[in-house]
Amino acid sequence: MNELSLLYNYLLVGGLLFVIGLIGFLVRRNMIVMFLCAEMMLQGVSVSLIGFGRYHGGLPGSESSDAWGGAWGGQMLVIFIIAVAACEAAIAMALILMLSRRAGKLDAAVWQDLREPGQPPFIDQQVPEERTEDRVWPTLTPAGIRPKPDRDELLHRPRI
Amino acid sequence: MTGALLAAQVPSWQEALACPSFWAIAIGALAVWVLLPNRIAYGKTLGGALAIISAGLFASDWPLLGDWTSQAVFWLLAAITLGAAICTICSRSPVYSAIWFALSLLGTAGLFFYQGAQFLGVATIVVYAGAIVVTFLFVIMLAQPEGHSDYDRISWGWFPKTFSVLAAATFVGLLTLLLGNLKQESANVPAATAQQAAERLHATGGILTEQHMAHLGRHLFSTHLISVELAGTLLLAALVGAVAIAIQGKPRLDTRIEEALR
């Protein structure tokens, strides 16, 4: 395996993943999608770090640098990135839940009152029509035998 | 393999126009611009076709990894990761976005396995796809139960969309330019050097050794011990903070009086 071209390919894949997350964060208005994009940028950085770690493991002199682990430094950083991303997701989810309870929707533009004084407000342009195929939400295929409800269940849960 | 691996050589316009990567970045940026939520008719078909052309141009310009099996596996994993990432930012429904993001994470985990980072691949699947994406789906379920909303069908407008895509294309272009020297070097690596690198990776302390997990644990709990403790403290603080934010205290007095009077 050619280690140099492996490094090149991984750096570009990581850069592309980072950039796609960047576009999504700047363009989308749904707060949950914005945070998914932030996580995607972290993933791009992780891919680059793993590529660098592998490359340094193949360099001459990487065996002797035991104190810093040579090749292992990249993997250590990615472990801590995963831990910090988990913390960030927990806090972000709690915040988004509170914000959506107050505003009633996940739109980031609801909170534009927090902008600087003197900035013009953001006003929606023409919103595209909702198409019929957009109204369909993901559903699960029914599997297994349909359960037979008995009398008690029918009394308690009228909608089964 | 010595020398400056990161050195930008500014190409002339003729060289840039003859380079497949330039066209791949330009067509890819156009594809993302078309695919993002907007009012273009047949946007998905057109954008998907442009994205496939862009991926093909990238594939023709990136250096080869060696034999064709490893090349095919790498391209499959990279295509899954990047394609699912583009679908994440382009789906109008946040549920589909979260599911595409989980697929992109599976692709990333595959890329980690491909580099020999076994533990990180498993940790990505367990922590990200298993915990974080499920939490996202729970929050979507709690916060947006009544179907699609108009703000998912429109972005902030044409200005942020165009300029973020342009900024992204510039970033990737500069990265490609900066790594040009690395690409040239990778074309003529002597076989002996590659052999030595493989031996070092497979040696006792290397990444591809059979004792991968043991070495990873040894480095984690000796060199980075304080960082582990700090990460644990951070997780605890995040847990306490999330609970403190999410739990609503008693309603305020005037609200309670209003409810009593109702």
Image: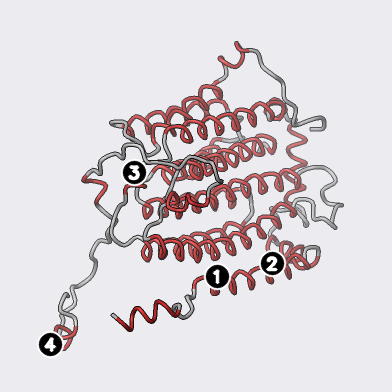
**Residue B102 shows in the view:** no
Which element carries disc 3, helix, strand or loop?
A: helix
User: Residue A97 at x, y = what percent?
Assistant: 45, 65
Per the image, the residue denoted by label 2 is B231
- The residue lying furthest to the bottom in this view is A152
Q: Which mark is residue B158?
A: none
Do dots 1 and 4 share one subunit? no
**Residue A66 shows in the view:** yes
Q: Disc 3 residue type?
A: Arg
Label 2 chain ID? B
Distance in Å between CA atoms under marks 4 and 3:
45 Å
Question: Which of the pair B241/B191 is nearer the observer?
Answer: B241
Distance in Å between CA atoms under marks 1 and 4:
43 Å
Rendered position, A46 above or below B183:
below
Per the image, the residue denoted by label 3 is B153
Which element carries disc 4, helix, strand or loop?
A: helix
Asked if the residues shown at circle 1 and circle 4 are in contact, with their CB atoms under 8 angstroms apart, the answer is no
